[in-house]
Image (cartoon, helix red, strand yellow):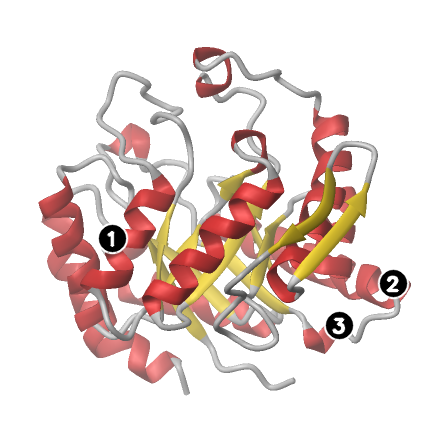
Amino acid sequence: MGFDIRFQVLTLPGNPYSEYRSQVRRVEELGFDIAAVPDHFCDWANPPAAWLECWTLLAALAVETSTIRLASNVAQIPLRHPGVLAHQAITVDQVSGGRLELGLGAGLAIDPGTEMIGLENWSNVERAARFGEYIELVGLLLSQEVTTYDGRYYQACDAVMNPSSLQSPRVPVVAAALGPRMMSHAARWADTWNTMSFDPDFNAQIDELGARAQAMDELCSAVGRDPAALRRSANLFDARARAEGGRLRYYDDDDLFERLVRGLVAAGFTDIGLYYPSDPGQIPSFEHLALDVIPELRH
């Protein structure tokens, strides 16, 4: 397909809205392609911390920005019926002028928000089974005026979506997947596959993600899809950051950053996901990479 390389920035919604809005506007000014918002009931790693809601933020950011694409990274399927989520997504797509990417994930079994609001904490096996139906039904709702669906877990009966997606053929769907079963759902139903590695060794991360990308080629072929027709997104996660006060090693080392990006691109990834610095001292480095390094890497 020859997709262009895109760079996404995940901004954690733990600041007052005025500060959060300024962060996203700056991400847009710096030329990034996508601003992403996580979706949890609370900060799952620190529940008492401040935390703003994903879809309310995306709607607000649709008005506060003009060019950058907006994404949920990723919407947790336990929190909403697929019909409600599709309606939210279409609304944000309309408000933003067609700039939404709908990221979906199965959710975390260790997320404390599940117990906080009385949701059933599904097993990982059930999460994956539900996700297959969920992403299929959401894709139908985003692309059809009227949808009927009768699955084991989810149903829709003459569900009307008016207006529909502003983008054609519909809002792009991003599926977060690490293991084979979730990856097979991504291969079948998603426009973009999103994944990541939690290995603290960056060299091991690139190897792991490269192997996973090869496995995705096989899964696409198994469902009759051209592997080149699927965008591939990887989040650059630093497993040591929390223990080091939030500092991300790849913002302190241009050579490391370039090596990681080039390794992912060589493995077939088209979208590179970064994290907005939680350490204010790294913002100059983050902006330097955006202005001086990433433009060269795009080529």
| Cα–Cα span, label 1 and label 3 | 35 Å
Q: Is residue 59 above or below residue 201?
A: below
| Cα–Cα span, label 3 and label 2 | 10 Å
Front-most of 257 and 89? 89
Residue for point 86% across, 68% down:
221
What residue is disc 1 on? 60
Residue for point 62% across, 55% down:
160
What residue is disc 2 on? 223
Element under label 3? helix
Residue for point 69% across, 59% down:
146
Q: Residues within 10 Å of mark 2 (few under 14, many from 20)?
A: few
Query: Which label is found at residue 148?
Result: none
Q: Is residue 221 above or below residue 91?
A: below
Left or right of residue 183, residue 101 in this image: left
Q: Is residue 108 visible?
A: yes
The mark closer to the camera, 1 or 3, is 1
- Locate residue 79, reporting x and y percent: 52, 31
- Locate residue 247, reporting x and y percent: 24, 42
